[in-house]
Every structure is written in structure tokens, then in C-alpha cells.
Image (cartoon, rainbow, N blue to C red):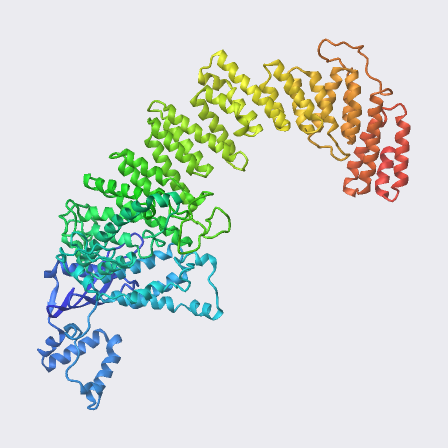
Amino acid sequence: MREHYKMADCFHLSGTVTEPAMQSEPETVCNVAISFDRCKITSVTCSCGNKDIFYCAHVVALSLYRIRKPDQVKLHLPISETLFQMNRDQLQKFVQYLITVHHTEVLPTAQKLADEILSQNSEINQVHGAPDPTAGASIDDENCWHLDEEQVQEQVKLFLSQGGYHGSGKQLNLLFAKVREMLKMRDSNGARMLTLITEQFMADPRLSLWRQQGTAMTDKYRQLWDELDSSSRPHRTVFTRAIEACDLHWQDSHLQHIISSDLYTNYCYHDDTENSLFDSHGWPLWHEHVPTACARVDALRSHGYPREALRLAIAIVNTLRRQQQKQLEMFRAQKKELLHRGVTSITNLEGWVGHPLDPIGTLFSSLMEACRVDDESFHGFSDFTENMGQCKSLEYQHLPAHKFLEEGESYLTLAVEVALIGLGQQRIMPDGLYAQEKVCRNEEQLISKLQEIELDDTLVKIFRKQAVFLLEAGPYSGLGEVIHRESVPMHTFAKYLFTSLLPHDAELAYKTALRAMRLLVLESTAPSGDMSRPHHIASVVPNRYPRWFTLSHIESQQCELASTMLTAAKGDVRRLETVLESIQKNIHSSSHIFKLAQDAFKIATLMDSLPDITLSKVSLELGLQVMRMTLSTLNWRRREMVRWLVTCATEVGVYALDSIMQNWFTLFTPTEATSIVATTVMSNSTIVRLHLDCHQQEKLASSARTLALQCAMKDPQNCALSALTLCEKDHIAFETAYQIVLDAATTGMSYSQLFTIARYMEHRGYPMRAYKLATLAMTHLNLSYNQDTHPAINDVLWACALSHSLGKNELAAIIPLVVKSVKCATVLSDILRRCTLTTPGMVGLHGRRNSGKLMSLDKAPLRQLLDATIGAYINTTHSRLTHISPRHYSEFIEFLSKARETFLMAHDGHIQFTQFIDNLKQIYKGKKKLMMLVRERFG
């Protein structure tokens, strides 16, 4: 490696860097050259060819080698000094060797320079001396860190080409982070890089195309902008804030005194008005639009003025705290009137948390940076140790108090307090999707930072102070007694406050969390308040603006807050009842209430602790609320919810099971009540689980039977069978259920339902009742000639077999019904064949006897069935011949063969069948091939 130098602050370093071979890559050697000027790298070149806005690893390696091992880098005078020491022969040898070594690269340039030097009138001969790249720049020349402007432009182009979605934004964020880093180091390239980024955005060809076409912004994209829907400021653009920032100045003498001195006070200042320059301590205040004031703090930090930023931040926080106290006093004076009217004023339409300028985040970061132990934090190196940038664990300490802090306060307490002030501010939910997501995201990010801080007694005092203020501060607080309907909910913040305060002040913790549980945007009546923009109804009503795009996330946070309180309240009856009331009043989503019910049940029945009966009851109450909420709405989890509720009621006890059965009509559908609830309650596993005695079992059974009969009356189609099953052990109840089925059979029940109940009756030993229901089912049935695979066929065959087994009279009664309902020839012939194989009543029940003779096909009822079957075959034959194709001919011939078997069962069947075939040959003589097949088979 070689380094050339002329002066202590001007360098040129060159060398080779070897990258060791990897598994799939060979060893590479890179030639690196670095130029320095006044402690800055002003240019770099590397043969690796990597393109990025950051230096490649080879440049970094060479730089670190020079820093760590300066003695091993050979130093050289500037080349001009070396050449000056050579004589003519040495100079000629030097030039010729240089050309020989690099003849392909430098020979054309060498020839050109030689020609110009030998020409007296050439431009090169008009200048005294010659340039020396190893001697560094002139002291008057501009100097700045090397920046590959082309790569900056390429990175932005890449971002734009990817549509600006998801992962592509990370690269752009890195660019902006680099800008901040440069500005913090007072690197002039920071502003240049920001200019390059902006220019590349403005140079995107789509902008001019959209402008020419007059393309309007779609609703989808409009949602992504923070404030372009604002009705109060209709002419805002994405550049409005930047343009407004250009009008800011720093010439205000009060501002200059604040940022330049730790000793700026006025102890004789007695102006206690709203905009006074000093507080009662004589400490300076800074009254300005809060986001703008905090943007000044951010600008000072970003441009490398951390001490000035800290001074202004402290003045702003003191101003906010004074303002907070004034607001509390003002509200207390008007509290009675405001609460009586139920009105709230929104003093901040523009919230500080989630604001594009992130004012609270800026103040918090500035103050936290001052807590990080060493002075390096004021020079931008706070996060790094000397060991090659290894990130060290951040330990925040109560450093000695600044001049303008109360006794016992520190930068840390101030940072925590301003975060709590910002998070607790009552503010209106912004309109756009992106803005609403940012409100949630920034709140969670700020709370995440707060959670890194270990609370001590000093910080707990801050939490207590702010929690009390937020509860009492009326319209200025998101936790005030009356808030605006569209106020940003406090659930996430309150959960953090609750968990932080709980070990130290449980009463205050619960009071805060319970106040935060409300979600007024879903309430039908909520304070409208007064605002500078028209009041709209939120997203509960579809297609009404403004819409709360993050509502589902907000509801889940509300649920999390409630779950946290339930968990903490285990074993405390009073608190559990209070939390239950709050959930029932404020949570409007059945799925979230169900989740809370399940959470409470799990906590109440943990294996490693005794069951908490109060928490189990809370779980049951929530479950009952879910049942009522979802009873008349479609919910895909409904069946799961019903089963869970029975499990929960079982855990609570027998009285809970009895209660849900007695009040089933407010909780369940008739089907759910019979098929799930009563059936589960009456199962052996439930009886064993509850250790029920005979009296308790009978009481539950009685409730279950009453439920079953009520459900059967209300929905006989779906509940009759379950009702009969549940009433089996009680004769009167069973008879009542059977009568309900009979009453409903003529109007409200289908043949399939009646057949199912009839089969159940036969199975239970009631064949005559089964027969009665089967005949009722037959009256509802209608099987056409071509329905030979209908699912009801088995039921028809079963009904006929049942009638046949009971005796001739029953069979005689059902056959007319069969003839009327069934037109399918194959089914009828199957029934006919079965009836002729055995004597009716031979397998009868109840000791009934018969003569043992087979029934005659020439007499009723079988004659009627035979005639109907023959008629069905004739009608079916004509129907099939109407649209028959040659590929079905052989199948048709087989069908006629079966028909002949039935015809022949009649005493004159042979004659009838012959006449039938003759008619077919005459009517369908045009189907010559088919008729030929008929003749071959049947003559």
C-alpha cells in the first residue's frame, strides 16, 4: 500500500485489497485509490465495480488499515517534489518506463501532451507549472465528502420503478437516514443528497403525463396522504409543509437566547398570561404551534446542534406542562356547566402522536439522548463504542438536573412526562387510511420505547401525576369525563398505564383503564362536541365519511385492555364485577366478547391454581351476552360458541345449566337448544362431571324435557326427533312430543323428516306409531317415472315392509298411498314382488296371528298395486321411446323384459303384454332397428 502526502491535511492513499476465496467465489484482488482533503474523503475508486451510495468494503478496509497501522503505510512526497529532484536522464527514463508499463492506457495521452508541449502557442504552455493530484487541493478550493450522485439518482429511480410499495420503501428510508446522518455531521452533501432525491422524484415522467392528462387522484391514493381531504384547508398539497417551513426564521431574540444559553432567565418577570415568555420560576417558555416548535428541535439535532436542540426541547416541555396546568384550572372552573351539557371541545384537531412531524417523538428522543451517560451523544456517536461501531446496550440514567428542571427531575423524567402528555392528548382521528395507520403505529412505537425504561420511584410519581391529570382534565385529555365521538381511543395507552401503575397504585390503575374502555364511535348516542369542521358519523354506517379504516385494530386493542384487567382482577370480586360491567357496556363486537369470555375461563380454571368461581361467572356472563348478540345474526363460529357456553356453564355449576335451559329462547335457536344444549346437559359425562344426585338429575331432566317440548312446538321440522329422544324416560312428555309431531305432520314437515322419526319410533318399539308416521310421510312424497335412484325409495320400501309385517289391513291402507305417490315402475314392481313372497303379519308384533295364506293378486289391495305397476311400465315405455337413442336400445329391451315379468303376474298378463308389444310395433314402426330387436326378443 502506498500513501502520498504534501501537507498534514491533504492525502492520497492507494493500495490493493485481497478478498479471500469463498466456497463458490475465487480470491479477488481490488485496486483502491482514496483522496483526502482536510479530514474528508473526497473521492474513491475501486476496481470491484460495486455501485452504491455507501463506500464498498474494500475502500473501508484500506481506510481502516491506514488508521490502525499507520507505520506500515509507506509515505511519499507529492510526485511534483520527486520529479523536481530528478535530472534530465532520470526524467526521460521515468516517463519512458511509465509509458511502457501502461502503454495501452496512456500512450495516446502521452503523444497528445508531447505535441502540445512542443507547440509554443498551445494552451498548456500558457500556464505556469503543472497539476499534481498527490499534492491535495488548494486551501481556497471547496472540499466535501465523496458522494456518488449517480448512485443516489439510481436508487430513487429503482424505488419509483417498483411502485413505492412495501419493501421498496426501505431503500428510500435508508437514503433519508443517510441525509440526516450527513446533516448531523455538518456534511454539506446532506443538502445536496436531499436535492438529488427531490429532483429525481420531480423528473419522473409519469408526473408530466398525469398533468397533461388531467388525471385525478383516486380515492385509494388519496387515503395515503395525510391531510389532502381536509375541508378547512382545501388547497393543500404534499409540498405545503415544506413550503411553510421555508417561511420559518430564527431571528427571534427570545428564541436565540433560549438555544444559545443555559443561563437565560428572568426572575423578575411577572406576566402570567397565556403567552408569557417566562414561567413563575423565571424559566423561558416557547409558545409556538407545537409541531412547528418541535420541528425546530429536530432541525437543530439533524444539523449537528444537540445542545441547542436540548435547550429548546426543555423550554417546549416546560411550556406544555404549564399549559396543561392552566387547562386543568380552566376546566375545573367550567366543569359543572360542561358536564351538565354533555359537550366537549376539541382543542387539538391535529394530534401530536401520529403527526407527520412527530413532535412528541422528537422531544422524547432529544431528552432521552441526553440521558445516555456520556458527552459523545452531543456529537452523533451516542449509539456506538470504540469497537468498530458495535451497538451498546442503552442504559438511561437520571443525570444531574438541568437548570430549568424542578428538584428531583432529570432529562429522563422530562422525556417520560412529555411522552405521557402526548399520548393522553384528546385528538380527532384523521381522515385518511395512511394517517390513521400512522396514529396507531406511532403510538405503539412510543409506548415500546417507554417500555424499555425501568420504572423507579421518581418515574412512578410522574405516572401518578399524569394519570390523575388525564382523568381530571376534561376536554384536553383523551381520558376526560366527556370526549368527542371521533376522539382517538386510548386503549393501547391505557393498557400501558394500567400495567405500569398496577403494582404501585391499583385504584388509579383501574380507574384509568376503565375510563379508557369506551369506544364512542360505535355508540348510537355520543357527545357531538364543537369542532371547526362539520361533524360526520363514523364508519359504523357504511359509506359515510370519515371512515375509521383502523377500526378492527382499535377494537382488538380495546379487547386486549379488557383482557389485561380481567387477568389482573382474578380473585377480587369487586374489581371483576366492575370490569364485567365495563365490557358489557363498551365492547360491541361479539367475536371480541367471546375471546374475553374464553380468556376469563382459561384464567379461572388454570391447572396450577384453585378455580376462581367469580371469574368463571364473569366468563359465563360474557358468553351469555355473545349468545344474545349472535342469536339473530349469521356467525360461522356460532356452533363453537354454543358448545363452549355449555362447557362454561357446567364449570359454574348445575344451577347455571338449569338457568340456560329455562331461558333458552333468549340465547339459542330451537335446534341449538335441543341438539347441542339439552343433549349435552343430559349426557352421562355431564352428570359424572357434576357429581349429581338423583334429585338434581331429575331437576335437570325436567328442564331439558320442558325445553325440548317448547322447541318442538316452535320448530317441529328440526326439533321433533331431539324432543322425542329427550322425553323418552317420561311417558307424558313423550306422548306430548309425539302429538306435536302428528299435529305438524300435515303442514310443516317433509316426508324425509317424517320417515326419520318413523324409523326412530320403530327402533324404540312403537311399530304402530311408526306406521302412522310412515303413512303421513307417504302423503308428502311424489316419485315420477324416471326417479329410480331417488333417496326416498329405501324409505318407501321400509314403510311397505313395516305395513306388511303388521298385517293385511295395514298393507291394504298403505298401498293406495303408494300408488298415488310413486309412478316409478321399477320401484312399484319391487314392492309388488316383496308383498307376494310372504304372508302379511307373519313377522308381526304384539302376538298378532294370521291365517298364513299369501295374498291374492286378483283381489285388493295387491290387484290395485299390480294394475298401477303395469300402468307405470306402459307410461314409462312411451316416455322413454320419445327421446331414445340407438346406444340405449339394448338397455330398453332389458327394461321390456322386466315389464313382461310384471305383466305375467296377472292372470291375463300374457295377452296384455302381447297387445302392448303389438301397439309399440305399430306406433313406433319408424324406429326400424329397435322394432327389429323387439321382434327378435318378444315375437
Instruction: State the residue at coordinates (77%, 18%).
Output: 810
Q: Is residue 191 left or right of residue 91?
A: right
Q: Nearer the viewer, residue 676 or 102?
A: 676
- Residue depicted at x 41% and y 64%: 235
Height in image: 671 above or below 520?
above
Pinpoint residue 25: horizontal percent, then vertical percent.
30, 56
Residue 786 seen in the figure: yes
Q: Is residue 393 visible?
A: no
Q: Is residue 766 left or right of residue 437?
A: right
User: Which one is in front, 43 or 245?
Assistant: 245
Q: Is residue 345 left or right of residue 799?
A: left
Image quarter hosting the N terminus:
bottom left
Q: Residue at x 80, y 30 (%)?
A: 898
Residue at image coords 42%, 54%: 431
Eyeballing the image, is 536 above or below 235? Answer: above
Examine the image and state in which quarter residue 779 appears: top right
Residue 730, x across and y down, in percent:
59, 14
Check the picture and name the quadrant holding the C terminus.
Answer: top right
> Is residue 277 positioned above or below 460 on the image?
below
Residue 663 x/y as whole percent: 52, 25
- Residue 669 x/y as whole percent: 56, 30
Determine the image quadrant of residue 522.
top left
Residue 247 sits above or below residue 671 on the image: below
317 sits left or right of 558 in the view: left
Residue at the extreme bottom: 121
